[in-house]
């Protein structure tokens, strides 16, 4: 995730605070100096950093904190609270026009920010909430923009409105709203044209659309990987056109995270969603408290539970729990578990949400995707009987499996050995899969650790 470097540095600061039984004002100031440098290196706006550090210090150097039973932990609690405040405190929900049959949302942003893909992601998100959306192709300049929206709309099961014979975005938007009213759509999402940079021609076009169509929400799609540049873009669009909120794309990349920590304070506009991957399902509601928890290395179990509830087949999960308890977890179950984890965003995403597991360190190297894919190829080369009972795998069978999956036999031997070790471990963990009822989440964390070791 975008904050891995920042999280690691903050965790080191917190480690130093926890190690001291008593804190002085100088201790707090020294720690805040490190926090300040970490935030600046994460490309957080300088004025935002200055105010953040000042607010933490003012609260942390009080007599009640410094002389408390656990001053280090109290300071960390203050940092967490100020971080939540910085990110926006309350979760901002997308609004819908009261008393009107159609709500119109206008998406805007620069080229390369992922606006068209994010527009389709948003339509899919609203579909899960019972909204019937109409995607509208208002980008009449970029080659294949209309086609891209149509392909993504089809994947999401959302209708796309296009007038390929028209080069007037305003006329297209007006016609789309009328079409939506006649065909029972409750939300119209306009995918407008982008530019390489903010220019008057683009701004005038967006203004004209807003003058002729009643827009409820104007949402900016900003590329989180561009750091402070994304904040400047948000400020520019707000000054020229007026925006109601921001969707940060590419939050799963190598961005330093400065945009997420700066936009609210600099522009006063909330972050509504964050794009956490390339899949059309990888759009998450932005929760300031959960994001602060991730940044500070405390995990995000609530989001993980929600993902599990949305994607995991409850009955299948219960069946797997029973198998694990009885030590009957086989290769078919392994494949099923991997499929479920991919639906939840992948093993790396899951590990990143588990508190205390990574300590803020880069988790990308903790999961060997190549090895996992190789393991799946090996398992798919087994017969049904072999997947159900690894004990029947003779050297001859293993050689056949190795040839069938295109790998050296040592990888087959390693997989079988590790799998048997995993089965033994599971027999010693009868309560591993007990836990939360929602989607059988209780054992996913432990199971992911076991699977991660199978390489």
Image (tube, grey):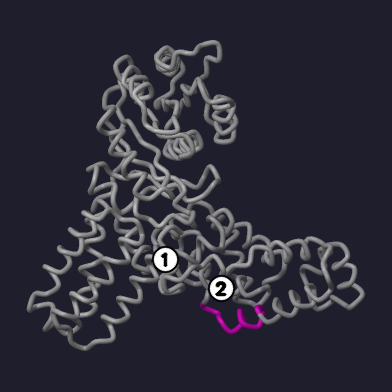
Q: Is residue 170 left or right of residue 314?
A: left
Residue furthest to the left in view is 63
Please say if 396 is above or below 173: below
- Of the two numbered discs 2 and 1 in the rendering, the one whose residue sits closer to the viewer: 1
- Magenta residues, as a range? 422-431
Please report contact status of discs 2 and 1: CB closer than 8 Å, yes or no.
no
Tell me the residue at 50%/47% (across/down): 282
Q: Is residue 327 left or right of residue 257?
A: right
| Horizontal and vertical percent position of residue 168 | 45, 13
| Horizontal and vertical percent position of residue 150 | 57, 27
Which residue in the structure is indicated by mark 1?
A: 5
Q: CA distance from mark 2 to mark 1?
A: 22 Å
Kind of element beneath mark 2: helix
Tag 1 or tag 2, which sits nearer the N-term?
A: 1
Which residue in the structure is indicated by mark 2?
A: 449
Label 2 crowding class (10 Å Cα cut-off): few <14, some 14-19, many 20+?
some
Location of the C terminus by quadrant is: bottom right
Say the numbered circle drawn on residue 80: none
The secondary structure that dominates the magenta segment is helix
Q: Is residue 344 left or right of residue 305?
A: right
Tell me the residue at 31%/42% (across/down): 232
């Amino acid at each position: 995730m975008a904050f891995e470097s920042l999280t690691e540095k903050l965790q080191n600061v917190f480690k130093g605070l926890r190690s001291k039984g008593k804190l002085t004002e100088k201790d707090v100031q020294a720690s805040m100096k490190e926090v300040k440098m970490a935030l600046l290196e994460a490309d957080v706006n300088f004025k935002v950093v200055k105010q953040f550090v000042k607010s933490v210090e003012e609260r942390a150097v009080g007599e009640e904190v410094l002389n408390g039973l656990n001053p280090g932990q109290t300071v960390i609690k203050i940092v967490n609270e100020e971080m939540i405040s910085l990110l926006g405190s309350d979760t901002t929900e997308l609004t819908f026009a009261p008393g009107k049959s159609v709500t119109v949302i206008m998406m805007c942003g620069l080229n390369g920010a992922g606006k068209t893909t994010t527009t389709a992601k948003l339509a899919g998100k609203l579909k899960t909430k019972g909204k019937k959306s109409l995607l509208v192709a208002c980008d009449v300049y970029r080659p294949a923009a209309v086609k891209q929206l149509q392909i993504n709309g089809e994947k999401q099961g959302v209708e796309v409105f296009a007038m390929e014979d028209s080069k007037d975005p305003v006329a297209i938007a007006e016609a789309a709203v009328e079409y939506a009213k006649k065909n029972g759509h409750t939300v119209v999402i306009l995918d407008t044209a982008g530019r390489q940079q903010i220019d008057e021609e683009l701004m005038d076009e967006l203004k004209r659309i807003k003058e002729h169509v009643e827009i409820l929400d104007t949402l900016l799609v900003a590329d989180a990987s561009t750091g402070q540049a994304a904040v400047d873009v948000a400020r520019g669009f707000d000054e020229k056109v007026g925006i109601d909120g921001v969707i940060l794309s590419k939050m799963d990349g190598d961005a330093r995270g400065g945009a997420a920590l700066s936009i609210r304070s600099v522009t006063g506009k909330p972050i509504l969603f964050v794009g956490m991957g390339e899949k059309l399902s990888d759009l998450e509601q932005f929760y300031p408290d959960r994001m602060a928890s991730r940044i500070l290395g405390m995990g995000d179990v609530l989001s993980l539970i929600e993902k599990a509830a949305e994607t995991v087949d409850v009955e299948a999960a219960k069946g797997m729990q029973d198998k694990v308890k009885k030590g009957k977890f086989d290769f078919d179950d392994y494949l099923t578990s991997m499929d479920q984890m991919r639906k939840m965003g992948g093993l790396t995403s899951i590990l990143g949400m588990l508190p205390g597991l990574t300590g803020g360190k880069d988790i990308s190297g903790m999961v060997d995707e190549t090895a996992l894919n190789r393991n799946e190829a090996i398992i798919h080369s087994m017969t049904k009987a072999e997947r159900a009972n690894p004990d029947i795998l003779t050297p001859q069978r293993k050689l056949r499996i190795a040839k069938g999956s295109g790998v050296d036999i040592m990888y087959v031997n390693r997989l079988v050995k590790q799998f048997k070790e995993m089965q033994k471990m599971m027999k010693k963990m009868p309560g591993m899969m007990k836990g939360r009822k929602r989607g059988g989440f209780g054992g996913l964390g432990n199971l992911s650790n076991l699977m991660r070791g199978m390489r």
